[in-house]
Amino acid sequence: MSTVAVPADVDVGPAGTGWPGGRLRPSGVGAGPAVRGSCAVTPAGGTPPVPTERPRRPRLHPLDRVAIGLALLGLGAVVTGLLPRADAGATLHRILPLLLFLGAVVVLAELTAVAGVFDVLATRLAITARGSFAGLFLLCVGFASLTTVALNLDTTAVLLTPVMIALARKLGVAPGPLAMTTVWLANTASLLLPVSNLTNLLAADRIALAPAAYAARMALPQLAAIGVTMAGLWLWYWRRGRRDVDRFTPPPPHRPADRLLFGTAVAGCLLLVAGILAGVEIGVAAAVAAGLVVAGFAVRSRRTLRPALLPWRLLVFVTGLFLVVQTLGRHGLDDLVSVLLGDAGGTAGALRAGGTGALLANLVNNLPAYLAGEAVLPPGDETRLLALLIGTNVGPLAVPWASLATLLWYERCRAAGVTVPLRRFVATSAVVAVLGTLAAVLALLVVG
Protein backbone atom coordinates (compact mmCIF):
# COMPACT_ATOMS: atom_id res chain seq x y z
CA MET A 1 0.00 0.00 0.00
CA SER A 2 1.43 3.39 -0.90
CA THR A 3 1.63 5.91 1.89
CA VAL A 4 1.17 9.65 1.80
CA ALA A 5 2.90 11.79 4.39
CA VAL A 6 0.14 14.08 5.65
CA PRO A 7 1.69 15.27 7.89
CA ALA A 8 4.99 13.45 8.32
CA ASP A 9 3.46 10.70 10.44
CA VAL A 10 0.13 10.20 8.70
CA ASP A 11 -0.87 8.06 5.76
CA VAL A 12 -4.03 7.48 3.79
CA GLY A 13 -5.63 4.07 3.52
CA PRO A 14 -8.84 2.75 2.11
CA ALA A 15 -10.45 1.77 5.38
CA GLY A 16 -12.33 4.52 7.14
CA THR A 17 -15.56 6.33 7.59
CA GLY A 18 -17.31 4.98 4.52
CA TRP A 19 -16.93 8.28 2.67
CA PRO A 20 -14.47 8.28 -0.22
CA GLY A 21 -10.91 8.15 1.00
CA GLY A 22 -11.40 6.56 4.39
CA ARG A 23 -9.70 8.01 7.49
CA LEU A 24 -6.31 9.52 8.05
CA ARG A 25 -4.43 7.46 10.58
CA PRO A 26 -1.01 7.58 12.29
CA SER A 27 1.75 5.55 10.73
CA GLY A 28 5.50 5.32 10.56
CA VAL A 29 8.37 2.94 11.00
CA GLY A 30 7.28 0.22 13.36
CA ALA A 31 3.77 1.61 13.65
CA GLY A 32 1.10 -0.91 14.51
CA PRO A 33 -2.50 -0.94 15.61
CA ALA A 34 -3.21 1.60 18.31
CA VAL A 35 -4.01 0.10 21.71
CA ARG A 36 -6.04 2.41 23.88
CA GLY A 37 -5.53 2.35 27.59
CA SER A 38 -2.47 0.07 27.62
CA CYS A 39 1.26 0.51 27.55
CA ALA A 40 2.97 -0.19 24.23
CA VAL A 41 6.08 -1.69 25.87
CA THR A 42 6.14 -4.89 27.95
CA PRO A 43 8.81 -4.92 30.70
CA ALA A 44 11.52 -7.50 30.08
CA GLY A 45 10.62 -10.78 31.74
CA GLY A 46 7.47 -9.27 33.18
CA THR A 47 3.74 -9.41 32.70
CA PRO A 48 2.05 -7.06 30.27
CA PRO A 49 0.47 -4.13 32.10
CA VAL A 50 -3.25 -4.20 32.81
CA PRO A 51 -5.33 -1.85 30.66
CA THR A 52 -6.30 1.27 32.59
CA GLU A 53 -9.49 2.00 30.69
CA ARG A 54 -12.03 0.22 28.55
CA PRO A 55 -11.67 0.45 24.75
CA ARG A 56 -13.73 3.24 23.27
CA ARG A 57 -16.38 2.52 20.72
CA PRO A 58 -15.74 4.08 17.31
CA ARG A 59 -17.61 7.36 16.89
CA LEU A 60 -19.61 8.32 13.84
CA HIS A 61 -18.18 11.06 11.67
CA PRO A 62 -20.46 14.16 11.55
CA LEU A 63 -21.10 13.54 7.84
CA ASP A 64 -22.13 9.97 8.69
CA ARG A 65 -24.72 11.36 11.09
CA VAL A 66 -26.04 13.63 8.34
CA ALA A 67 -26.32 10.67 5.96
CA ILE A 68 -28.20 8.51 8.45
CA GLY A 69 -30.42 11.43 9.43
CA LEU A 70 -31.38 12.12 5.82
CA ALA A 71 -32.14 8.45 5.22
CA LEU A 72 -34.40 8.33 8.28
CA LEU A 73 -36.18 11.52 7.25
CA GLY A 74 -36.74 10.16 3.75
CA LEU A 75 -38.04 6.86 5.09
CA GLY A 76 -40.28 8.70 7.53
CA ALA A 77 -41.75 10.79 4.71
CA VAL A 78 -42.67 7.62 2.80
CA VAL A 79 -44.11 5.85 5.86
CA THR A 80 -46.24 8.86 6.91
CA GLY A 81 -47.52 9.49 3.39
CA LEU A 82 -45.86 12.90 3.00
CA LEU A 83 -44.20 11.33 -0.04
CA PRO A 84 -46.40 8.85 -1.91
CA ARG A 85 -44.84 5.43 -2.28
CA ALA A 86 -45.29 5.49 -6.04
CA ASP A 87 -43.23 8.70 -6.28
CA ALA A 88 -40.57 7.30 -3.95
CA GLY A 89 -40.38 4.11 -6.00
CA ALA A 90 -39.96 6.07 -9.23
CA THR A 91 -37.17 8.12 -7.65
CA LEU A 92 -35.32 5.06 -6.41
CA HIS A 93 -35.64 3.43 -9.83
CA ARG A 94 -34.15 6.54 -11.43
CA ILE A 95 -31.15 6.79 -9.13
CA LEU A 96 -30.25 3.09 -9.00
CA PRO A 97 -27.81 3.35 -11.96
CA LEU A 98 -26.33 6.46 -10.35
CA LEU A 99 -25.76 4.63 -7.08
CA LEU A 100 -24.07 1.79 -8.95
CA PHE A 101 -21.79 4.30 -10.64
CA LEU A 102 -20.98 6.12 -7.39
CA GLY A 103 -20.15 2.92 -5.54
CA ALA A 104 -17.98 1.54 -8.34
CA VAL A 105 -16.11 4.76 -9.12
CA VAL A 106 -15.27 5.37 -5.46
CA VAL A 107 -13.84 1.85 -5.14
CA LEU A 108 -11.86 2.45 -8.34
CA ALA A 109 -10.53 5.77 -7.05
CA GLU A 110 -9.63 4.34 -3.63
CA LEU A 111 -7.63 1.48 -5.11
CA THR A 112 -6.03 3.81 -7.64
CA ALA A 113 -4.76 5.93 -4.74
CA VAL A 114 -3.50 2.86 -2.88
CA ALA A 115 -1.65 1.72 -6.01
CA GLY A 116 0.26 5.00 -5.92
CA VAL A 117 -1.08 6.51 -9.15
CA PHE A 118 -1.80 9.93 -7.63
CA ASP A 119 1.56 10.00 -5.83
CA VAL A 120 3.48 9.16 -9.00
CA LEU A 121 1.64 11.74 -11.08
CA ALA A 122 1.91 14.54 -8.51
CA THR A 123 5.65 13.98 -8.07
CA ARG A 124 6.12 13.84 -11.82
CA LEU A 125 4.36 17.21 -12.12
CA ALA A 126 6.83 18.78 -9.69
CA ILE A 127 9.79 17.27 -11.55
CA THR A 128 8.45 18.47 -14.90
CA ALA A 129 7.99 22.03 -13.54
CA ARG A 130 11.77 22.18 -12.81
CA GLY A 131 11.46 24.48 -9.83
CA SER A 132 9.14 26.97 -11.60
CA PHE A 133 5.98 27.96 -9.76
CA ALA A 134 4.32 29.04 -12.99
CA GLY A 135 4.99 25.63 -14.50
CA LEU A 136 3.83 23.83 -11.36
CA PHE A 137 0.67 25.96 -11.33
CA LEU A 138 -0.29 25.00 -14.89
CA LEU A 139 0.47 21.34 -14.30
CA CYS A 140 -1.48 21.19 -11.03
CA VAL A 141 -4.48 22.86 -12.68
CA GLY A 142 -4.38 20.30 -15.46
CA PHE A 143 -3.96 17.40 -13.01
CA ALA A 144 -6.85 18.49 -10.76
CA SER A 145 -9.08 19.23 -13.77
CA LEU A 146 -8.38 15.87 -15.39
CA THR A 147 -9.03 14.00 -12.13
CA THR A 148 -12.32 15.82 -11.67
CA VAL A 149 -13.46 15.25 -15.25
CA ALA A 150 -12.59 11.55 -15.33
CA LEU A 151 -13.15 10.38 -11.74
CA ASN A 152 -15.64 12.99 -10.42
CA LEU A 153 -15.22 15.91 -8.04
CA ASP A 154 -15.29 13.91 -4.80
CA THR A 155 -12.21 11.98 -5.91
CA THR A 156 -10.33 15.24 -6.42
CA ALA A 157 -11.43 16.65 -3.07
CA VAL A 158 -10.85 13.53 -1.01
CA LEU A 159 -7.95 11.64 -2.58
CA LEU A 160 -6.00 14.35 -4.39
CA THR A 161 -6.02 16.85 -1.51
CA PRO A 162 -3.74 14.87 0.85
CA VAL A 163 -1.43 14.05 -2.07
CA MET A 164 -1.10 17.73 -2.95
CA ILE A 165 -0.53 18.73 0.68
CA ALA A 166 2.13 16.03 1.01
CA LEU A 167 3.75 17.25 -2.22
CA ALA A 168 3.86 20.83 -0.89
CA ARG A 169 5.60 19.69 2.26
CA LYS A 170 8.03 17.59 0.26
CA LEU A 171 8.87 20.67 -1.81
CA GLY A 172 9.18 22.85 1.27
CA VAL A 173 6.43 25.27 0.19
CA ALA A 174 3.19 26.42 1.78
CA PRO A 175 0.35 23.91 1.18
CA GLY A 176 -2.31 26.61 0.74
CA PRO A 177 -1.99 27.20 -3.03
CA LEU A 178 -2.04 23.48 -3.86
CA ALA A 179 -4.92 22.80 -1.48
CA MET A 180 -7.01 25.64 -2.91
CA THR A 181 -6.32 24.38 -6.42
CA THR A 182 -7.92 21.04 -5.58
CA VAL A 183 -11.08 22.39 -3.94
CA TRP A 184 -11.84 25.07 -6.51
CA LEU A 185 -11.24 22.82 -9.50
CA ALA A 186 -13.09 19.95 -7.84
CA ASN A 187 -16.17 22.13 -8.27
CA THR A 188 -15.53 24.31 -11.31
CA ALA A 189 -13.97 21.55 -13.48
CA SER A 190 -16.95 19.22 -12.99
CA LEU A 191 -18.96 20.25 -16.06
CA LEU A 192 -17.44 18.41 -19.00
CA LEU A 193 -18.62 14.79 -18.68
CA PRO A 194 -21.73 13.26 -17.10
CA VAL A 195 -19.52 11.29 -14.69
CA SER A 196 -17.76 14.40 -13.40
CA ASN A 197 -20.63 15.25 -11.06
CA LEU A 198 -23.78 13.53 -9.91
CA THR A 199 -25.80 16.56 -10.99
CA ASN A 200 -24.44 16.09 -14.54
CA LEU A 201 -25.74 12.54 -14.61
CA LEU A 202 -29.17 13.77 -13.63
CA ALA A 203 -29.16 16.56 -16.23
CA ALA A 204 -27.92 14.33 -19.05
CA ASP A 205 -30.62 11.81 -18.20
CA ARG A 206 -33.31 14.50 -18.04
CA ILE A 207 -32.58 15.96 -21.49
CA ALA A 208 -31.51 12.61 -23.01
CA LEU A 209 -28.00 13.64 -24.07
CA ALA A 210 -25.41 10.95 -24.83
CA PRO A 211 -22.00 11.52 -23.16
CA ALA A 212 -20.36 12.77 -26.38
CA ALA A 213 -23.22 15.17 -27.14
CA TYR A 214 -23.26 16.37 -23.54
CA ALA A 215 -19.50 17.00 -23.63
CA ALA A 216 -19.80 18.95 -26.90
CA ARG A 217 -22.46 21.20 -25.36
CA MET A 218 -20.50 21.81 -22.15
CA ALA A 219 -16.93 22.06 -23.52
CA LEU A 220 -16.88 25.86 -23.93
CA PRO A 221 -18.62 26.52 -20.57
CA GLN A 222 -16.08 24.20 -18.94
CA LEU A 223 -13.15 26.10 -20.44
CA ALA A 224 -14.66 29.40 -19.32
CA ALA A 225 -15.14 28.16 -15.75
CA ILE A 226 -11.58 26.80 -15.55
CA GLY A 227 -10.23 30.05 -17.00
CA VAL A 228 -11.89 32.13 -14.28
CA THR A 229 -10.69 29.66 -11.64
CA MET A 230 -7.11 29.86 -12.87
CA ALA A 231 -7.19 33.66 -12.77
CA GLY A 232 -8.46 33.60 -9.18
CA LEU A 233 -5.94 31.00 -8.06
CA TRP A 234 -3.01 32.89 -9.54
CA LEU A 235 -4.15 36.29 -8.26
CA TRP A 236 -4.90 35.29 -4.69
CA TYR A 237 -2.78 32.22 -4.00
CA TRP A 238 -0.02 31.45 -6.53
CA ARG A 239 1.56 34.72 -7.72
CA ARG A 240 4.77 36.15 -6.27
CA GLY A 241 4.06 37.75 -2.92
CA ARG A 242 1.28 35.27 -2.16
CA ARG A 243 3.53 32.22 -1.98
CA ASP A 244 6.39 31.93 0.50
CA VAL A 245 9.29 31.19 -1.90
CA ASP A 246 10.15 31.95 -5.53
CA ARG A 247 11.45 28.52 -6.55
CA PHE A 248 11.45 24.98 -5.21
CA THR A 249 13.70 21.97 -5.47
CA PRO A 250 12.12 19.14 -7.50
CA PRO A 251 11.71 15.88 -5.56
CA PRO A 252 13.02 12.48 -6.65
CA PRO A 253 10.58 10.29 -8.64
CA HIS A 254 8.02 8.34 -6.63
CA ARG A 255 8.32 4.59 -7.11
CA PRO A 256 5.09 2.59 -6.73
CA ALA A 257 5.39 -0.31 -4.33
CA ASP A 258 3.86 -2.73 -6.85
CA ARG A 259 4.28 -1.88 -10.53
CA LEU A 260 1.71 -4.46 -11.63
CA LEU A 261 -0.98 -2.95 -9.40
CA PHE A 262 0.05 0.51 -10.57
CA GLY A 263 -0.39 -0.50 -14.21
CA THR A 264 -3.69 -2.23 -13.48
CA ALA A 265 -5.05 0.89 -11.76
CA VAL A 266 -4.02 3.11 -14.68
CA ALA A 267 -5.66 0.66 -17.10
CA GLY A 268 -8.86 0.71 -15.03
CA CYS A 269 -9.06 4.52 -15.13
CA LEU A 270 -8.46 4.60 -18.88
CA LEU A 271 -11.05 1.87 -19.39
CA LEU A 272 -13.64 3.90 -17.47
CA VAL A 273 -13.11 7.03 -19.56
CA ALA A 274 -13.06 5.05 -22.84
CA GLY A 275 -16.26 3.21 -21.93
CA ILE A 276 -18.10 6.42 -21.07
CA LEU A 277 -17.02 8.18 -24.27
CA ALA A 278 -18.03 5.09 -26.25
CA GLY A 279 -21.56 5.36 -24.86
CA VAL A 280 -21.48 2.42 -22.44
CA GLU A 281 -23.98 2.85 -19.60
CA ILE A 282 -22.10 4.67 -16.84
CA GLY A 283 -22.85 2.19 -14.08
CA VAL A 284 -21.67 -0.69 -16.24
CA ALA A 285 -18.53 1.16 -17.36
CA ALA A 286 -17.59 2.02 -13.77
CA ALA A 287 -18.35 -1.50 -12.52
CA VAL A 288 -16.20 -3.13 -15.22
CA ALA A 289 -13.29 -0.74 -14.60
CA ALA A 290 -13.50 -1.20 -10.84
CA GLY A 291 -13.81 -4.97 -11.30
CA LEU A 292 -10.54 -5.04 -13.25
CA VAL A 293 -8.67 -3.22 -10.49
CA VAL A 294 -10.32 -5.28 -7.74
CA ALA A 295 -9.20 -8.45 -9.54
CA GLY A 296 -5.64 -7.14 -9.61
CA PHE A 297 -5.69 -6.45 -5.88
CA ALA A 298 -7.28 -9.85 -5.20
CA VAL A 299 -4.20 -11.43 -6.73
CA ARG A 300 -1.49 -9.07 -5.46
CA SER A 301 -2.84 -7.51 -2.24
CA ARG A 302 -5.93 -9.33 -1.01
CA ARG A 303 -5.80 -7.72 2.45
CA THR A 304 -6.51 -4.32 0.89
CA LEU A 305 -9.98 -5.47 -0.22
CA ARG A 306 -12.09 -4.75 2.81
CA PRO A 307 -15.80 -3.86 3.19
CA ALA A 308 -14.83 -0.30 4.14
CA LEU A 309 -13.86 0.31 0.50
CA LEU A 310 -17.55 0.47 -0.42
CA PRO A 311 -18.88 3.96 0.42
CA TRP A 312 -22.18 2.82 1.85
CA ARG A 313 -22.64 6.04 3.82
CA LEU A 314 -22.27 8.12 0.68
CA LEU A 315 -24.89 5.96 -1.02
CA VAL A 316 -27.20 6.36 1.98
CA PHE A 317 -26.63 10.12 1.91
CA VAL A 318 -27.58 10.44 -1.75
CA THR A 319 -30.65 8.21 -1.43
CA GLY A 320 -31.95 10.04 1.64
CA LEU A 321 -31.29 13.44 0.07
CA PHE A 322 -33.32 12.57 -3.03
CA LEU A 323 -36.30 11.48 -0.94
CA VAL A 324 -36.15 14.50 1.38
CA VAL A 325 -35.87 17.05 -1.43
CA GLN A 326 -38.71 15.39 -3.33
CA THR A 327 -40.85 15.58 -0.20
CA LEU A 328 -40.04 19.25 0.36
CA GLY A 329 -40.83 19.93 -3.28
CA ARG A 330 -44.36 18.58 -2.86
CA HIS A 331 -44.90 20.85 0.16
CA GLY A 332 -43.83 24.29 -1.03
CA LEU A 333 -40.20 24.17 -2.19
CA ASP A 334 -41.14 23.76 -5.87
CA ASP A 335 -43.28 26.91 -5.72
CA LEU A 336 -40.47 28.96 -4.19
CA VAL A 337 -37.91 27.78 -6.73
CA SER A 338 -40.37 28.43 -9.57
CA VAL A 339 -40.63 32.06 -8.47
CA LEU A 340 -36.84 32.39 -8.33
CA LEU A 341 -36.38 30.89 -11.80
CA GLY A 342 -39.19 32.87 -13.42
CA ASP A 343 -40.63 32.24 -16.88
CA ALA A 344 -38.25 34.27 -19.04
CA GLY A 345 -36.18 32.57 -21.69
CA GLY A 346 -33.18 33.67 -23.70
CA THR A 347 -30.15 35.33 -22.12
CA ALA A 348 -32.04 36.72 -19.13
CA GLY A 349 -33.65 33.36 -18.38
CA ALA A 350 -30.35 31.46 -18.59
CA LEU A 351 -28.55 33.96 -16.36
CA ARG A 352 -31.41 33.81 -13.87
CA ALA A 353 -31.29 30.00 -13.84
CA GLY A 354 -27.53 29.99 -13.28
CA GLY A 355 -27.80 32.57 -10.51
CA THR A 356 -30.63 30.69 -8.83
CA GLY A 357 -28.63 27.46 -8.88
CA ALA A 358 -25.57 29.15 -7.37
CA LEU A 359 -27.64 30.95 -4.71
CA LEU A 360 -29.54 27.84 -3.62
CA ALA A 361 -26.34 25.75 -3.62
CA ASN A 362 -24.69 28.13 -1.17
CA LEU A 363 -27.78 28.30 1.01
CA VAL A 364 -28.35 24.55 1.28
CA ASN A 365 -26.15 22.33 -0.92
CA ASN A 366 -25.63 21.92 -4.66
CA LEU A 367 -27.39 18.56 -5.03
CA PRO A 368 -30.73 19.55 -3.44
CA ALA A 369 -30.43 22.90 -5.24
CA TYR A 370 -30.22 21.16 -8.61
CA LEU A 371 -33.01 18.72 -7.76
CA ALA A 372 -35.30 21.57 -6.69
CA GLY A 373 -34.61 23.51 -9.89
CA GLU A 374 -34.94 20.49 -12.15
CA ALA A 375 -38.35 19.69 -10.67
CA VAL A 376 -39.88 22.96 -11.90
CA LEU A 377 -38.14 23.37 -15.29
CA PRO A 378 -39.80 21.73 -18.32
CA PRO A 379 -37.73 18.87 -19.84
CA GLY A 380 -37.54 20.62 -23.20
CA ASP A 381 -35.91 23.76 -21.78
CA GLU A 382 -32.35 22.51 -22.28
CA THR A 383 -30.61 25.88 -22.08
CA ARG A 384 -32.09 26.89 -18.73
CA LEU A 385 -31.61 23.39 -17.34
CA LEU A 386 -27.92 23.41 -18.28
CA ALA A 387 -27.58 26.97 -16.94
CA LEU A 388 -29.05 25.75 -13.65
CA LEU A 389 -26.53 22.90 -13.74
CA ILE A 390 -23.67 25.38 -14.21
CA GLY A 391 -24.86 27.38 -11.22
CA THR A 392 -25.00 24.30 -8.99
CA ASN A 393 -21.58 23.04 -10.17
CA VAL A 394 -19.49 26.20 -10.43
CA GLY A 395 -21.39 28.29 -7.90
CA PRO A 396 -21.09 26.24 -4.66
CA LEU A 397 -17.80 27.74 -3.50
CA ALA A 398 -18.70 30.64 -1.23
CA VAL A 399 -19.35 28.51 1.88
CA PRO A 400 -17.90 25.14 2.94
CA TRP A 401 -21.27 23.35 3.03
CA ALA A 402 -22.27 24.33 -0.51
CA SER A 403 -21.04 21.00 -1.92
CA LEU A 404 -20.15 17.65 -0.46
CA ALA A 405 -16.75 17.85 -2.16
CA THR A 406 -15.94 21.11 -0.35
CA LEU A 407 -17.01 19.62 2.99
CA LEU A 408 -14.81 16.57 2.45
CA TRP A 409 -11.89 18.78 1.32
CA TYR A 410 -12.24 20.93 4.44
CA GLU A 411 -12.17 17.84 6.64
CA ARG A 412 -9.07 16.54 4.85
CA CYS A 413 -7.26 19.84 5.37
CA ARG A 414 -8.18 19.85 9.05
CA ALA A 415 -7.00 16.26 9.52
CA ALA A 416 -3.71 17.11 7.76
CA GLY A 417 -3.08 20.06 10.05
CA VAL A 418 -3.63 22.69 7.33
CA THR A 419 -5.45 25.79 8.58
CA VAL A 420 -7.97 27.28 6.17
CA PRO A 421 -8.43 31.05 6.80
CA LEU A 422 -12.22 31.13 6.62
CA ARG A 423 -12.68 34.83 5.83
CA ARG A 424 -10.20 34.73 2.96
CA PHE A 425 -11.64 31.45 1.71
CA VAL A 426 -15.21 32.81 1.66
CA ALA A 427 -14.25 36.16 0.11
CA THR A 428 -12.12 34.76 -2.71
CA SER A 429 -14.36 31.76 -3.35
CA ALA A 430 -17.46 33.97 -3.62
CA VAL A 431 -15.82 36.05 -6.35
CA VAL A 432 -14.80 32.95 -8.30
CA ALA A 433 -18.29 31.47 -7.86
CA VAL A 434 -20.02 34.58 -9.26
CA LEU A 435 -17.60 35.25 -12.13
CA GLY A 436 -17.21 31.55 -12.99
CA THR A 437 -20.96 30.99 -13.15
CA LEU A 438 -21.45 34.13 -15.25
CA ALA A 439 -18.67 33.22 -17.69
CA ALA A 440 -19.84 29.62 -18.07
CA VAL A 441 -23.50 30.57 -18.65
CA LEU A 442 -22.50 33.13 -21.27
CA ALA A 443 -20.34 30.49 -22.95
CA LEU A 444 -23.33 28.13 -22.95
CA LEU A 445 -25.37 30.78 -24.75
CA VAL A 446 -22.62 31.14 -27.35
CA VAL A 447 -22.74 27.38 -27.99
CA GLY A 448 -26.52 27.61 -28.35
Image: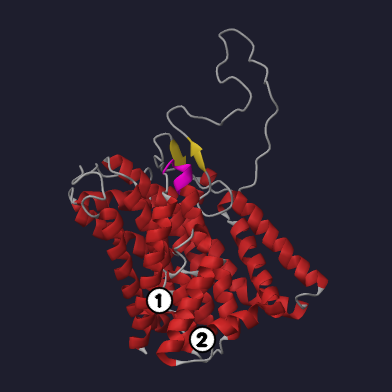
Alpha-carbon span between mark 1 and mark 2: 18 Å
Vertical side of 47 occupied by 443: above or below: below
The three-letter amino acid code for the residue at tag 1 is Leu
Vertical side of 266 occupied by 441: above or below: below
The three-letter amino acid code for the residue at tag 2 is Ile
Furthest residue in direction right, as rendered: 80
Q: Nearer the viewer, residue 368 or 75?
A: 368
Q: Position of residue 34 (x, y in %)?
A: 57, 30
Indicate yes or no whether the magenta region holds residue 321: no
The magenta stretch spans which residues?
413-418
**Residue 67 vs residue 225: left or right?**
right
Tell me which label, 1 or 2, sits earlier in the chain. 2
Q: Quadrant of the C terminus?
A: bottom left
- In what element is the residue under mark 1? helix
Give the quarter of the image for residue 250.
Answer: top left
Q: Quadrant of the N terminus?
A: top left
Give the quarter of the image for residue 255.
Answer: top left
Residue 209's disc is none
Residue 207's disc is 2
Q: Position of residue 354 (x, y in %)?
A: 45, 79
Question: Which residue in the protein does label 1 denote?
Answer: 277
Q: Position of residue 289 (x, y in %)?
A: 47, 64
Q: Position of residue 75 (x, y in %)?
A: 75, 66
